[in-house]
Image (tube, helix red, strand yellow):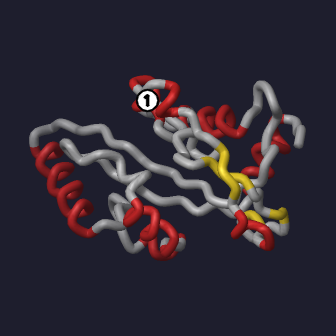
Amino acid sequence: MCNDGGAGRRRLLEVAIWVGYGVRLDDIDSLSSDPKFLELVDTLTRDKVDEFLPVRCPDATIMKRMEDMIAELRDQHDSIGGTVTCIIRGCPSGLGEPCFDKLEALLAHAIMSIPATKGFGIGSGFHGAEMRGSVHNDPFVSNPAAANATSAGVGIPASRLHTKTNHSGGI
């Protein structure tokens, strides 16, 4: 699918996208590949996410640690950075343009436009730079369960192929 920039961004907004929130505190690794976290993401709705204000973290224990750390640093007139994990499921193939307005580029543009954002990664992100190609590459495998499924409820048939490891972020 080739679109001009505006139409491509509009299409991104029209696609049903599930978003989950991950956190990183101290030495806690990214939750984006943790099966328990992915199960939690499947149960999230927009209203449910709003229940986790002000930090919007669906894990009550981690949410409390985040709130405590933010309060402590605020009292010290300091701040801390953080990470956000976004999971997209059922994204139709070919969304965006093949060269300069790829889905990854449009997402990076949107996220990097947020003030104070210093990095953006897809899939294994910056960790992928430390991995060997033989480990990081995503081999395609058959997905027979997708035979009658559709992508994100938009009526587009789901692919019968998927990647084995999802280091590429599924895009």
Identity, as a three-letter code, of the amino acid under mark 1: Phe
Q: Is residue 118 visible?
A: no
Q: Label 1, on which residue?
A: 126
Question: Residue visible at 45% across and 69% down?
Answer: 39
Give the residue displayed 39% in from the left and 74% down from the top: 51
Image position, residue 97 (x, y; %):
82, 34
* Above or below: residue 108 compared with residue 60: above
Image quadrant assignment for residue 89: bottom right
* Image quadrant in which you'd find residue 53: bottom left
Q: Residue at x 16, y 50 (%)?
A: 69
- Above or below, 13 against 169 in this view is below
Identify the secondary structure beneath mark 1: helix
From the viewer's perspective, is residue 78 above or below residue 57?
Answer: above
Given residues 26 and 114, the one toward you in this image is: 26
Viewer-closest of 143 and 96: 143
Q: For the C terminus, give its image quadrant.
A: top right
- Quick one: label 1, few (<14), some, or many (20+) residues within 10 Å? few
In the figure, is residue 36 to the left or right of 103?
left
Q: Is residue 113 left or right of residue 144?
A: left
**Percent position (x, y) of residue 63?**
26, 62
Quarter of the image with the N terminus in it: top right
Q: What's the residue at 51%, 25% (across, down)? A: 133
Residue 37 can be seen, yes or no: yes
Give the percent coordinates (x, y) of residue 119. 45, 30
In this picture, residue 159 sits left or right of residue 44: right
